[in-house]
Amino acid sequence: MKQFVASAVLFLLAALPVGAVVYKWTDENEGVHFSDNPHAGAKRLDLEQPPVISLPPVEEAPSTAPQTSSETKGYAQFGIVEPHAEATVRNNPGTVVVRFRIEPELRAGDRIRILLDGQLVDTAALNGATAELYEVERGTHTIGAVIEDKGGEAVARADPVTFYMHRPSVNIPANKPPRRL
């Protein structure tokens, strides 16, 4: 009971404005009371100023703008917009949607090649500035991309992005990836 009373007192004192006057007294049943109004037999409590805590300045969050490499021949921008750097992709069958920012638009004859963990990925699912990667295993991955011209020469390279694949379970039938024809 004493702990409850002490907790209640601390709560009430914390709720008072700074510099408030508080009076404490004990009644005939030995009940302790607190008030901001004087009472017969009450003692005035001098409350200390609460400590002031100075927090360090908040650092700016990293930009979510796509990273554009300096190696671009004929393209003002080429970068990976999605997945974001350090993002966790949650997808049971392991599908990752990759979106690019390309300015100007992809020229006729040029193509985007995607690298997942340094390995070239089949880009048959590439549609404009969006691609889907299938059956990506759980864990940490790095995705990169390059635009190649008709002759296979790299004309633009996107800075790689690290992301995390989260797949709750591949053993549950509902989580199996769809069969592609």
Image: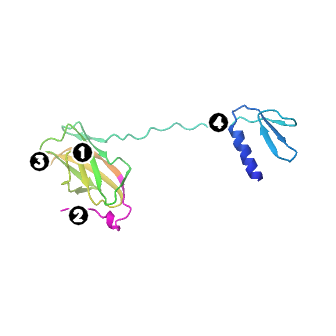
Residue 119 rendering spot, x and y as whole percentages? 25, 57
**Residue closest to the eye, 95 or 58:** 95
> Residue type at mark 1?
Arg
Q: Which residues are magenta?
A: 163-181
Camera-near label (1 vs 2) is 2
Type of the residue with mark 4: Val
Residue identified by numbered label 1: 157
**In the image, is residue 98 part of the stretch drawn in magenta?**
no
Relative image position of residue 81 (x, y in whole percent): 30, 44
Circle 2 Cα neighbour tier, 10 Å, few/some/many (<14 / 14–19 / ≥20): few
Q: Examine the image and state in which quarter residue 118 appears.
A: bottom left
Among the two numbered marks 1 and 2 on one chain, the one whose residue lies closer to the N terminus:
1
Q: Report how far apart the C-alphas of labels 1 and 4 lie in the structure.
A: 50 Å
**Mark 3 crowd level (few <14, some 14–19, many ≥20, 10 Å Cα):** few
Circles 4 and 2: CB distance less than 8 Å?
no
- Residue placed under numbered mark 3 in the picture: 151
Where does label 4 land, which residue?
52
Dot 1: element: strand
Across and down, in percent, residue 18 comes to 69, 32
| For discs 1 and 4, the disc positioned in front in the rendered view | 4
Residue type of the residue flagged with mark 2: Arg
Mark 1 and mark 2: Cα distance apart in space: 32 Å
Spot occupied by residue 97 in the image (x, y as percentages of width and height): 28, 51
In primary-sequence order, the first of circles 4 and 2 is 4
Residue lying at 24% horizontally and 47% vertically, measured from the top left: 130
Task: Report the Cα–Cα distance between label 1 and label 3.
Answer: 16 Å
| Secondary structure that dominates the magenta span | loop
Please tell me which residue is depicted at 87% across the width and 35% down the height of the picture.
Answer: 40
